[in-house]
Amino acid sequence: FPVTILGSMSIFSGKQISKHGHYKRFPIAGLTIMSIGLGFMSTLTASTPFWQLAIYAILIGMGLGLSMQTIVIALQNAVKPSELGIATSSNTFFRSIGSTIGVAVFGAIYGSRLAHYMPEQIALVAKKTPAAMANVTPEKLASIRNNTSVIKTFAPELQEGIYNAFVHSFHIVFISALPVTLLGLVLAFFLRETPLRSNDPAFKQAQEDAAGEAIG
């Protein structure tokens, strides 16, 4: 669902940029919306309804859609026609590197926080409601990482504690991601906006010449 929103907003921003010739406003708006979505995500609880979660996910998808493709347009508009291939491929390469590092970093944050909150919540349940820990073995608790369906076999009090551990861990991930988008927002204000060259006859001729050189 968020992927659909991302694609739709990328198409929308592309059409608006082609129509009006201005692109700087879109990453600013996109990163602002995305930061708001991440902020809302950090307030989720175990009882948050799905429709509310969907709205927050839509905000993040909208923000990413408005920002991601616009940066490509700004990059292509800033280089020589003969450098379009290098610039575009470099952007794709560094985006892939960034996503790989991001998944690794935020995955590590999530894992470390879950390893902290899970025993804490389980100990709290054992202290307040010892009966909820009946027939709960260390093996069952360890299997949660690979099979979350095991949680349904536990007492309601223990289920709530485990869900709270997951939620608190996700809170830290979203809070950690927020400074990244805010930094991007600050940098977006320094983005240099130049007139689009797509309709410039000289630019089209330069593209054809560059293509001819590449073929030759």
Image: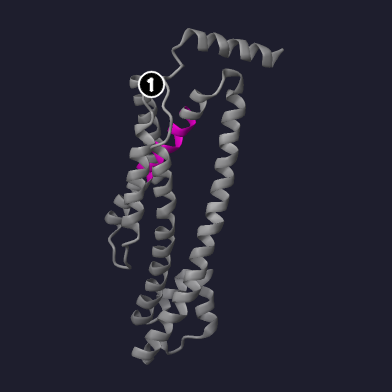
Q: Mark 1 points at which residue?
A: 18
Q: Could one spot residue 60 in this view of the protein?
A: yes
Q: Could one spot residue 129 in this view of the protein?
A: no
Q: Residue 48 location in percent, x, y?
A: 29, 63
Which span of residues is magenta-colored? 61-73
Residue drawn at 41 percent across, 36 percent down: 190
Q: Residue 138 location in percent, x, y?
A: 53, 84
Q: Tell whether 112 sits left or right of 21.
A: right
Circle 1 sits in a helix, a strand or a loop, which is it? helix
Extreme residue in the right direction: 216
In the foreground, 74 or 69 = 74
Vertical relation: 12 (above or below) 208: below
Name which quarter of the figure residue 6 lies in. Answer: top left
Q: Residue 153 location in percent, x, y?
A: 42, 78
Vertical relation: 191 (above or below) 113: above
Residue 5 is inside the magenta segment:
no
In the foreground, 163 or 184 = 184
Q: Tell whether 62 sits left or right of 81.
A: left
Name which quarter of the figure residue 24 lies in. Answer: top left
Residue drawn at 36 percent across, 38 percent down: 28
- Residue type, numbered disc 1: Ser
- Placement of the C terminus among the 4 image quadrants: top right
Q: Residues within 10 Å of mark 1 (few under 14, many from 20)?
A: few
Name which quarter of the figure residue 211 lies in. Answer: top right
- The kind of secondary structure the magenta stretch mainly shows is helix
Q: Which colour scheme is used?
A: one colour
Residue drawn at 38 percent across, 92 percent down: 130
